[in-house]
Amino acid sequence: MKQTIKHHFKKLKANEYLKIFILRLIGNFLVFSAIFMIAKTFYKPASEEIRYLINKKIEKKYLTTDIKNISNLSRQLESQPKGGLAKLLNIKPAEVIIPEDPNFSIVIPKIGANAKIIDNVDPSDTKVYLEALTKGVAHAQGTAFPGEPGHIFLFAHSTDYFWNVGTYNAIFYLLYKLEKGDEVDLFFRGQRYVYKVIGKQIVDPERVEYLTRKTNREFLTLQTCWPPGTTLKRLLVFAARVAE
């Protein structure tokens, strides 16, 4: 009788340990899943902010030039001495940005942005533009191309949910740091086109007149979500072509 009772208690104790083990396993899984989701959400935006702060501290310069001169400029910069912090972190004090695709790319030296541009993307077709924005910056269908008189509209704004900010929004994440006079370079069919920022504005998503604006001069609009990670507003940065 005593052995039966003792065996019963051992069995209860084993079941209790098993339940605790399963609960702990589930708890650890949920914790690690939460950490993974947070890291996935904030990794790219956080890394962009940290990179920008470090570069600003060491006064790093991003440079770009015509395609044919990029190699020569890169070699010239290799011999430049590094400052204290730049040397400690093994960061170049100046760096030439080579466009992702000379056929159609955007380079923004101030924030070190460099991305391929997907042309003729329908901004009214969610499936189409979300797919395009996983590959680079989207050029709105029906707007002008570099070298043509008219309005060029580029966007890298879509983040349907906050946790997708790392997937869609990192390219233009630092766009809000641009000020009047900052340079934006477009590379199109092997040629470089230089634009200067002339202003910026935060608008409601319904303000589609910015997409269809008409102009006789080369005018560039860059769009991203604002605040980052939401679809509440749109940040628009306006730039005009610099005369050669």
Image (cartoon, rainbow, N blue to C red):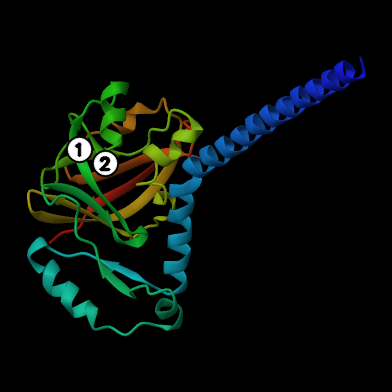
Check the image and report above or below for 42 versus 90.
above
Which residue is at a point 29% across and 22% down the rendered structure image? 127
Which residue is at a point 52% across and 40% down the rendered structure image? 36
Q: Where is residue 187 drawn, in percent x and y?
A: 15, 52
Q: Where is residue 44 drawn, in percent x and y?
A: 43, 48
| Residue 136: mark | 2
* Mark 2 neighbour density, 10 Å: few (under 14) some (14–19) many (20 or more): many
The reply to whether dot 2 and dot 1 touch (C-beta < 8 Å) is: yes
Which residue is at a point 41% across and 47% down the rendered structure image? 173
Check the image and report above or below for 110 versus 12.
below
The image quadrant of residue 149 is top left
SS class of the residue under badge 1? strand
SS class of the residue under badge 2? loop
Amino acid residing under circle 1: Ile
Please give left or right for residue 81 compared with residue 139 in the image.
right
Which residue is at a point 29% across and 42% down the rendered structure image? 221
